[in-house]
Image (cartoon, helix red, strand yellow):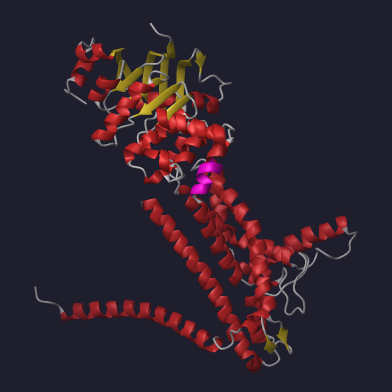
Amino acid sequence: MIKSFKKDIKGILIEGLTLSSALIIIAIVVVMFTVIFIGGKDQITWEFLTSFPEDGMTKGGIFPAIYGTALLVILMSIAAVPFGTITAIYLTEYAKENSIIAKTIRFAVRTLAVIPSIIYGLFGLGFFIKFVGTQMDETFLGGQLKWGQPNILWASLTMSLLTLPVVIVSVEEALKTVPRELRAASLALGATKWQTIWKVVIPGSISGIMTGTILAVSRGAGEVAPILFTGVAYYLATLPASLSDQFMVLGYHIYVMTTQSANVDQTMPIQFGTTLVLLALTFILNMSAIILRYRIRKKKTD
Amino acid sequence: MTHEKIYTENMFLHYGSKMALNDISIQIPEKKVTAFIGPSGCGKSTFLRSLNRMNDLIDGVKIEGKILIDNINIYDKNIDVVTLRKKVGMVFQKSNPFAKSIYENVAYGPRINGINDRKQLDEIVETALKNAAIWEEVKDRLGDSAMGLSGGQQQRLCIARTLAVNPEIVLMDEPASALDPLSTSKIEELIVQLKEKYTIVIVTHNMQQAARISDLTAFFYLGELIEFDKTKKIFTNPEKKQTEDYITGRFG
């Protein structure tokens, strides 16, 4: 039983290798946050957050991009949350666990979740704008162009498709935490299935529905590709006032200033500031979703 | 002899291809406590759940034969299960209050029946809690969460919740098996009081409990009803050898 020196070295090397890759991950996160924070922190003023871009976007604030992002995620949630929740209710409460229809829906949801986001953008362009929008214009406006072009409505609906799987999976998980005994208790009191879902199951899983909403919002706030063809604008001098208007978004604003600006160096502080705002926004949203989810899981094990 | 409330004739129940109840014929009288005893897996709980059609929720359950309540076949095509379950209430083994206030737990049944008048609800809640012998303990904190009650109190709350729907029959599936002796004796006292107004059918593992509280006892074994008679007779002078073996503790 003599210790093999060779084996020892191998063990140390492997441990060292695994540890260093783990440390590299931490380093990347730290560097990323530090660079963005240092570069952006002096830029974040009340004025920066509340004013319009000026002088060809080399000065001024990012208010339209913040406003557009907020509007986008609100409209997206209005579409995605009820739709996703209803689907999740069907899957957990009505469909038989291993029925063909349930399996097909789950397969479709998983597929939706892995489709590259730019494809959603193309789908949105083809379906919402070229098909639905153009049809609406021809039917209601005699061919006058209003809905058959990019706007915040089509962009939000496209984004809602992208976030739908997130909502469905979160809500399903939450619905499953409601104990079977409570459903039985409600039914045994003479409640119908729907009364049981509405008065017992949904109130018992409201925090899961919120988690799904927040995750969807955070995903939607960070994505650019799905709205690229469907509604986001390079620069607008006014805020969107109707569903048929275009809008600005934080993520796209960063792209525009880094690649399309006449003087990239001059816009550097604004780029950092915008990035910091976007990062903080998604970070806060994700943290709150994680905290909510943690509390649900804790409740489940109690 | 009192009126028979529940009547089954040649009733069979299958889970998929497995037979769980074999040719059950029984007549359960009104306003008495009837106990179902027998070893685990003998079908007594399955039979109980057939009486308010809770087995409908389980895939692959097939029932044949007659189950009549007040001379109506409850498995008839035009029977509304929701109405049936209002008439035939159920208390479960594990207390299962909703994550709502004590008041809202009891008001749940009346509310789904469309009663929203506050005064009327107050009355129903108070009566149900009194009938379930828990009013004195909770009257000052009706707005508190039901989850804060002890296990025994939760179970009595669940009984109150069932009574608030005004059922005629109350099915109880081992209602005291998860409780301490003191809570158990409270539930037992309560059951004896309840038979003045309700027909009680209780499944129990505890033979002393059956002997203490029931008027009639049915002994189930391997999906069959072996013997059904007055409790006194079952426990002192059973007809069948299997019943005698079980109650004297020779198996089970």
- Residue B118's image quarter? top right
- Residue A274's image quarter? bottom right
Asked if residue B23 shows in the view, the reply is yes
- Extreme residue in the left direction: A1
Q: Is residue A235 left or right of residue B69?
A: right
Foreground residue among B136 and A114: B136
Q: Residue at x 49, y 25 (%)?
A: B166
Foreground residue among B136 and A39: B136
Magenta segment: A197-204
Q: Residue at x 67, y 83 (%)?
A: A61
Foreground residue among A73 and A257: A73
Q: How many marks?
A: 0
Q: Is residue A167 left or right of residue B188?
A: right
User: Looking at the picture, how far across and down is residue B63, in whole percent?
Assistant: 45, 22
Q: Please, what is the dominant secondary structure of the magenta stretch?
A: helix
Is B178 part of what is drawn in magenta? no
- Extreme residue in the right direction: A142
Image position of B8 with respect to A292: above or below: above
Q: Residue at x 25, y 37 (%)?
A: B180
User: Looking at the picture, how far across and down is residue A215, in whole percent?
Assistant: 54, 63
Q: Is residue B182 left or right of residue A219?
A: left
Q: Residue at x 67, y 76 (%)?
A: A65
Q: Is residue B21 left or right of residue B39?
A: right
User: Looking at the picture, how far across and down is residue B245, in whole percent?
Assistant: 18, 18
